[in-house]
Amino acid sequence: MAQIFDRRANTLVRLTLFVGVPLVLAILGGIWYLFGWSDWHRDVGVPVAQPGGGFNHQLHVGLKLDCRYCHNAVEVSSSANVPPTETCMGCHSQILTQSEKLAFVRESWETNTPIQWNRVHDLPKFVYFNHSLHVAKGVGCSTCHGNIAAMPVVAKSKALFMSWCLDCHRNPEQYVRPRDQIYNTAWTPPADQLAQGKKLVEEYRIRSADQLTNCAICHR
Amino acid sequence: MSRITAHRRRPTPAGFAKFAVAACCLLWFTTACHLEMYDQPKYKPLQQSDFFADGAAQRPLVEHTVARGATRLDEAATGRVGGMPEGAYVPSNPLTVTPELLSRGEERFAIYCAVCHGRVGNGKGSAVYPQFNPRPASFYDPRIVAMPDGELFDVISNGRRNMYGYRSRIQTVEDRWAIIAYIRELQKNPPAE
């Protein structure tokens, strides 16, 4: 009987086994890895739908409302709260009282049940984060959340990877800003940010990279 | 007696390669096992809960709850003479007015009052004021200039008519008195209309 495979087939089999298969695996693995680290995978820039007429930051911040008018706990607590219905009603008991878009706010007020906003930023529960500390040490809202004042519907502007937290904890001077600019979401770093930042890091007494990359501060 | 020697196979490069490939394939199964830690059975502030009727994990305080050790019945805490709940309004700021208090007041005023009452306190704040009926008050109104400080404190804390109270947002009484001190400072120099 004639041989089905000639001798060259052996090389072909070896080639597929030791080069082809690892290559395909590597490519698949690479795609998988890049996918995991991509902003796309984390829904960065994708507006999150909210109940009812939603809430428009662009419109309201455009009325010269300070972030703290609604997120009033941001300076004193780990969580930057989302406002209770009462905060909305302070204006909307007078403004657009018949609007369809605000029916969900009035209903929440009348039935005394909270509005269920959908979370946009959500760290895993094994991570501890604290707003008041960052805000007190010169990290502005827009460094982490982007220009909220220009967003009709809030979307994430950062994927919230651990490497991102660590990048700043190692070199905060790239990002820190003067205290009176914290709530200015349109702030852009000056040309000499590094020099300015170094001064501010000293002024705010921000601790060393050693201490700020200790696993236990975020995974406690 | 015969000795049984274990035939141990020495690892060959090919064997090792096979092992490595198999191990890599197994690694695939170790992913996605960690979701329990991402979503632990604990609540973050303001999280949703199926357990309570209103759907919120965070429970409202029972009315009139006072944190232990936080009872304050002095004039600064109530704005009333002698700290009595229904007493007369205190005529003037119980805190000492310092430059720090004033600049704190200016900052808080800009956050919480200026949208409606205006940066200068004339009752014309950003785009909001025309839609109110009655309009937000001007702080240069002689009636408000003559108000005792304790009454201003009551307006900020509990609201008045169409204005909602700010007790829950301006949580420390010191901040409320700082705002009052700043309003008094504003009233000394009425803007030219």
Image (cartoon, coloured by chain):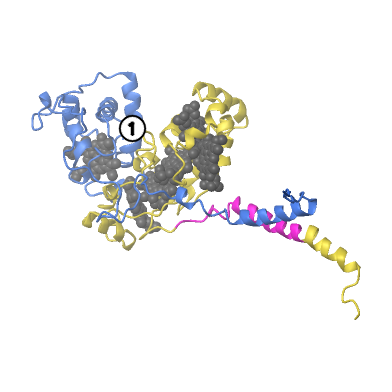
Chain of the residue under the numbered disc 1 shown in the image: B
Residue B146 placement, left or right of B112: left
To which residue does mark 1 refer? B108
**B48 in relation to B102, above or below:** below
Query: Which chain is assigned blue?
Result: B
Residue A103 placement, left or right of B10: left
Residue A124's x, y, as percent?
Answer: 47, 47
> Looking at the image, can residue A140 be seen?
no
Q: Quadrant of residue B112?
A: top left
At x 52% / y 34%, what residue is drawn?
Answer: A215
Residue B142's x, y, as percent?
Answer: 18, 32
Q: Residue furthest bottom?
A: A1
Q: Secondary structure beneath disc 1?
A: helix
Q: Quadrant of residue A32?
A: bottom right
**B22 in relation to A220, above or below:** below
Residue A34 lies in the magenta stretch: yes
Q: Quadrant of residue A14?
A: bottom right
Under mark 1, the amino acid is Arg
At x 58% / y 41%, what residue is drawn?
Answer: A163
The colour with which the image depicts chain A is yellow
Residue B99's x, y, as percent?
Answer: 33, 19
